[in-house]
Image (cartoon, rainbow, N blue to C red):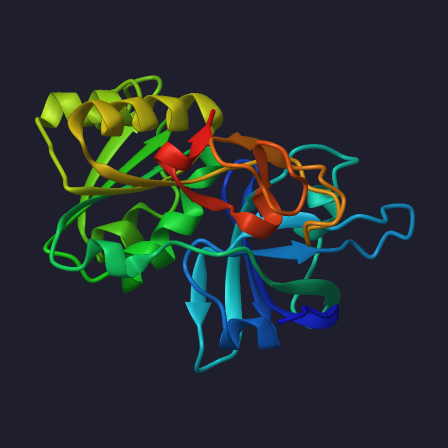
């Protein structure tokens, strides 16, 4: 269905760690939202015409609200303006956008839910909703600022990796899997490209069904501008070349479907 811009109302905002904010928005998008989807959020700054795509962290359908956990990436990126919002403020949004994770693929199976960096937040709603035989949440952080840790612990068995070794395994999410001798039948992952490449390779080497959520710069957010394409093995019907649009066809893809 087509998505229209609407005004979302800020319910609350808090800082979870240095530069990491949690923003609850009241929006009709909550009625349809699924784990792995995102919102396109506009600033109220008229000089910034394009929205910023932010993954959905939590969904509260009863309250009609979505939780967005994001990192402030600079003065001119729009996220700085988001961090200054207060309860009662209104902001334009479009969503929910994208396809989300195929939860049915994990039914009755041992599953990895993997997130790294700002790819950690969307794993929370995924952990809350997925119905699987064994839920193993493997997340990676830079340091001891392990935002959302308590929420993850309430929704599955949590394994943490930190770059500086301050919490859990020293290294990345793959290091945590090796150190803990973990295994799975299905993988759902979101994070920076180097992490996703490693997970994709691991999944293919071990014959594990794997879905990855790609992070790309987006412009229109609806697949029209081709500004966020990724290489694929199959020819895209829209552009007739070997690519797909992350905003429209993704952001979640079967790992064997894309070349990263």
Question: Relative to 167, does residue 94 appear above or below in the rendering?
Answer: below
Judging depth in this view, the residue of 64 and 183 nearest the camera is 183
Rendered view: 183 above or below 154 = above
Please provide percent x and percent y for residue 44. 82, 57
Between residues 139 and 221, which one lies in front from this camera angle?
221
Rendered residue at 30%/59% (across/down): 103
Tally of marks: 0
Q: Position of residue 16 (x, y in %)?
A: 47, 46
Q: Quadrant of residue 213?
A: top left
- Give coordinates of residue 81: x percent, y percent: 75, 48
Residue 167 in sight from this viewpoint = no
Question: As drawn, which residue projects farthest toward the bottom?
Answer: 62
Residue 159 vs 21, above or below: the answer is above
Give me the residue at 57% from left, 42% from top.
246
* Residue 239 in which image quadrant: top right
> At which x and y percent is residue 99?
49, 56
Q: Nearer the viewer, residue 79 or 189?
A: 189
Q: Is residue 214 visible?
A: yes
On the rendered structure, is 90 left or right of 102? right
Does 253 appear above or below 150? Answer: above
Q: With 38 as the anchor, is 107 left or right in this view?
A: left
């Amino acid at each position: 269905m087509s998505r229209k811009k609407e005004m979302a109302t800020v319910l609350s905002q808090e800082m979870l760690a240095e530069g990491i904010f949690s923003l609850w928005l009241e929006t009709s998008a909550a009625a349809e939202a699924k784990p792995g989807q995102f919102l396109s959020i506009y600033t109220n700054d008229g000089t910034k015409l394009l929205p910023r795509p932010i993954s959905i962290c939590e969904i509260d359908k009863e309250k009609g609200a979505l939780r967005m956990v994001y990192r402030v990436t600079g003065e001119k990126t729009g996220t700085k303006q988001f961090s200054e919002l207060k309860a009662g403020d209104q902001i334009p949004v479009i969503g929910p956008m994208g396809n989300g994770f195929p939860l049915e693929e994990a039914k009755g199976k041992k599953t990895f839910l993997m997130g790294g960096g700002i790819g950690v937040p969307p794993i929370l709603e995924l952990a809350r909703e997925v119905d699987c035989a064994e839920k193993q949440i493997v997340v990676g952080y830079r340091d001891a600022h392990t935002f959302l840790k308590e929420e993850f612990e309430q929704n599955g068995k949590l394994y943490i990796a930190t770059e500086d070794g301050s919490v859990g395994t020293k290294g990345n999410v793959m290091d945590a899997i090796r150190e803990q001798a973990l295994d799975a039948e299905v993988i759902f992952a979101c994070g920076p490209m180097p992490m996703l490449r490693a997970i994709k390779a691991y999944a293919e080497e071990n014959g594990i069904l794997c879905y990855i959520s790609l992070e790309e710069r987006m412009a229109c957010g609806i697949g029209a501008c081709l500004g966020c394409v990724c290489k694929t093995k199959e020819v895209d019907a829209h552009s007739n070349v070997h690519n797909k649009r992350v905003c429209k066809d993704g952001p979640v893809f079967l790992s064997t479907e894309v070349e990263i």
